[in-house]
Image (tube, rainbow, N blue to C red):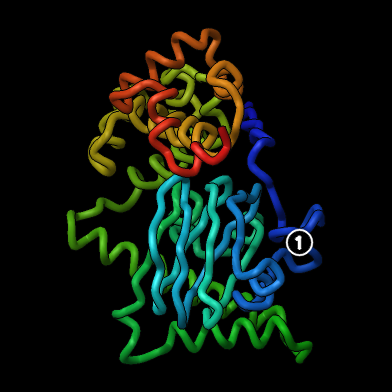
Amino acid sequence: MIASTKIPASVPVFQLYGEDAQSLAPDLIHCESIASRSRLHNWEIHPHRHHGLFQVLWLELGEAKFQLDGRWGQLSGGTALLLPQHCVHGFKFSKDAQGIVITFAYALLDKLETHLAHELMSLAEPVQCLLSDFVNDGTLQAALRALHLEYQGRDAYRQTAIASLLNYTLARLIRQRQTEENNKKSIPVGRAREHLTRFVALIEANFVLHIPLDQYAIWLDISVAHLNAICRQISGRSALQLIHERLMLEAKRELIYNAITIKEISDLLGFNDPAYFTRFFKRQEGMSPRDFRQQSPVAAQLV
């Protein structure tokens, strides 16, 4: 049986930012303009995360400063972000910002084409897509606007139209991401990639439980050697490295965004001994958790 990772409660977890609703109902999707929500919060969305929800943010015009899992940066018009569940994200939009935010439940991924669903399920970190390749035909932008209009309306076949436009939007964005990756290296497809997608999903559900690598292989019905070969072939890292990277991602989120002790973070991440957690972190990052926290401008504001 696959256990579920407990999401630490210290970073706010919302369905929709600033709201206490427990689910998206009834169609498991929400679509709104950037301005409609950010205007209510002085154009600033403080760092938070979502559980069981995927978001697509399209900044059509204007600018935004962002925080994504402790990274700071700037977005300009013509940029889309793919935001998987659990990633910590926050934005400070310019007052002329225009764009759309689509939020949908992971349950909707089951209705997508299999390979597209696998690609989206495998994302554990935010992905930035530059839409410059779509400027000439404008079809992606038109689809995003149409999805927003359909969501606001109540015309016949509304849900069918929304589903079609969402499928098209996600397909184009993932295609853009794959094109950018293919410019760097050739990405294998087929059975090996399906195994990797399932492995990433298993890591997401179990990384704080420190499951032995051979148990992951059993769940996937392949050998540990085969699992390592797949991971190295497609990602360039071993299976254990992928597990450690997910642990480190969560450790950094807690160190940056939450004013809790190193011991509390160690406990949250399933380490029996804070000293072992410190050694693990230093081996991966080259510095101690304490030093990493002190170097973060976000974390410094919490201390």
Which residue, given by chain and number where applicable, does mark 1 sit on?
A: 24
Q: Look at 45% across and 54% down and name the residue there.
A: 126
Q: Look at 53% across and 47% down and name the residue there.
A: 87
Q: Look at 62% across and 75% down and name the residue there.
A: 163
Measured as percent of width and height from the top left, residue 66 is found at 47, 59
Is 270 placed above or below 179 here?
A: above
Is 301 placed above or below 110 here?
A: above
Look at the image and tell me in which quarter the N terminus lies: top right
Left or right: 14 in relation to 57: right
Left or right: 184 in relation to 162: left
Label 1: state its secondary structure: loop
Q: Look at 46% across and 29% down and name the residue there.
A: 247
The residue nearer to you, when weighing 12 against 154, is 12
Measured as percent of width and height from the top left, residue 276 is found at 44, 10
Measured as percent of width and height from the top left, residue 240 is found at 35, 25
Is 138 placed above or below 236 here?
A: below
Look at the image and tell me in which quarter the C terminus lies: top right
